[in-house]
Every structure is written in structure tokens, then in C-alpha cells.
Image (spheres, helix red, strand yellow):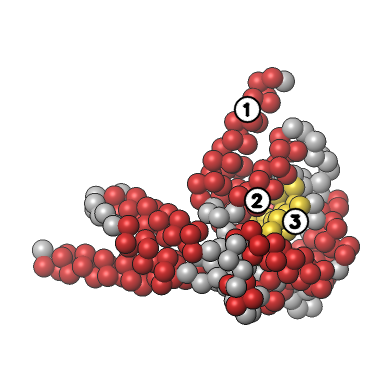
Amino acid sequence: LHQIMKNRQAQLNDVQRRLNQNIKGQPQAIQGVLDALTLYFAGFQDPTKPISSFLFLGMPGTGKTETAKQLAQAMFGSPDALIRFDMSEYNDQDAVHRLLGTADAGGTLTEAVKHQPFAIVLLDEIEKGSHDVQDLFLQVLQDGILHDSDDQPVSFKNTIIIMTTNLAAKVVNDQQQFNHLRQGEQRQLQFKAVVEKALKNEFRPEFVNRIEHKIIFNMLDEKIGLAIATKYLTEFKVTLAQRQLKVDFSPEVAQYLATVGFDMTNGARPIAYMLNAKIKAALARVLLQQDATQ
């Protein structure tokens, strides 16, 4: 038992290291995820239900989906252990049938979990799914099992269910209501209140109450934008090094990306766009021109 617990602690430490390394500006969210997984590693989870269930709330581009990706790698050893659904594609009357399957085709959900039973099941923008689809996942959270179109049981007991929502973006449409709050803590407290209000307005209580852990991802600020820009540049340098290309970026490059690309309502996404548009594209042109002259 001692060795088992030691191994579990080592895996939890790996989850913590990976999240801290890749998710910037979200210490409270990371700690919330770690606290939830600690229950699993200690053996306190209900064995008849999924390993854990989360609702990640916040603005776009703040790390919700990236956290799910990192958990797939840390918990199940592969980025392929991520089963991802865009819930905007499941808001019609046939959505449940597509997830469970029909006489003509297997279900997108049930077939994916059959082939990858140890996985993160990511439901992006769950608020866009129909009520029938939300009820389907209520069954998953309650029973840990679904029956496909052939009435065959599909177990979700070795999955982690993560739902994300950008519903806060509907409310925070005026940046000035947050910009006038200079203290980050003050801003985050107001944002938390906005998110909790939006959560109550958007989802039915029986749905929200079934999800074990509600994790709020903070709005990003300029300082975090710089950390994210630096991370993106470091990852790009590693990619280039794998092609035997050595490139160094001055601190001003990261500052430029953070300044030009930072957007409170869209998080890190504009920074990634600026990296592609201003740096990767320019470097690609130089490399192609060099290849053409050789």
C-alpha cells in the first residue's frame, strides 16, 4: 500500500508540475483541479462514477481547454487521451442520437469511449448543447455508464468529464467595468461574482449540482500576457531547434507580443495569432527564400 500511495503521489506531482508549467495566471484554478484529483489518488472517489467531473468557467483564451489537454497527458500518458466535442454541433433534436448512435452508425461519444476508455472527455462550450444533451451527461455523471444504440453498456468510470463554458464573455462585454479596478484581487473578485451570476442564469440547478467541481479561470492581465508570450516563444525555439535552427528572441519580442496581442476579453488567443502573423510568417518567408537560392 505504501508503494501504491507513493506512486500516486508521484503522478499527482507530475500533474502539478505540468499544469504550473503550461497554464499561466491561474493558480487558484490549478489548485482546485489538484484538490479534486487528490481525492481520486487517495481512493476517496465513488468507483461507480467517472474519476471526476469539472465545469471550467471563464473568458475565452484563459487556459480552460489547455488544462484539459495537459491533464490528458499527465493522467493518461498521451495527448490522444482527449475526446473532444464542440457542443455547438449538438444543439438540435438529433444530437443525442448522434452521440449514442443509430442503426446506421455508431455514436460519436460511445464509440470514442469504447476505443479510449481511459480519457478526458472534453465538452467545449457546454451551454451551447441542447437540454437533452445536457441531460444525457447528467446520466453519465450519476451512473458512470451509458447504453449505445445497440443497448450495449459503455463505461465512463475511467474518464474525467470536463465541461467548459465561455458564458462570462456574454456578460463582460465592457472592459471598462474591470479596467477601473487597478488591484488584481479586486478585479478577480468582481469577475467571480459575474461568473457565478451567469452560471445561475444559464444552467438548471439540477445540472450544475451534479458536476462535482466548478473551477473559475481568472481574467488575464498584462503581466500574465507577458508570461504567456514568453512561453510561446520558448516553445517555438524548441520547435526550431528540432529542425537544427537556432533562433534567439530578445525580451522586447515577448513584450511586443504581449502589448499588441493582449486582450482582456479574448485572453491568450490574440497573442498566439500575433506570434503566427508577425514572427512565424516572417521567419517562414526567410527560410523559403534561402531554400530557393540554394
In the rendered image, residue 154, in percent from the top left (x then y), is placed at 77, 51
The answer to whether the residues at label 3 and label 1 have Cβ atoms under 8 Å apart is no
How many angstroms separate mark 3 from mark 2 (CA)? 12 Å
Q: Earlier in the sequence, mark 3 or mark 2?
A: 2
Residue wearing tag 3: 214
- Amino acid type assigned to the residue bearing label 1 in the image: Asn
Residue wearing tag 2: 28
How many angstroms separate mark 3 from mark 1 (CA)? 27 Å
In the rendered image, residue 33, in percent from the top left (x then y), is placed at 68, 47
174 left or right of 202? left
Task: Say few, some or many: other residues with alpha carbon within 10 Å of mark 2 (under 14 / 14 to 19 / 20 or more).
Answer: few
Element type at marker 1?
Answer: helix
In the rendered image, residue 292, in percent from the top left (x then y), is placed at 15, 68
Q: Please, which residue is most extreme toward the top here?
A: 2
One can see residue 151 in this view: no
| Mark nearer the viewer, 3 or 2 | 2
In front: 290, or 209?
209
- Amino acid type assigned to the residue bearing label 3 in the image: Lys
100 left or right of 221? right
Name the residue rendered at 79%, 72% in the picture: 202
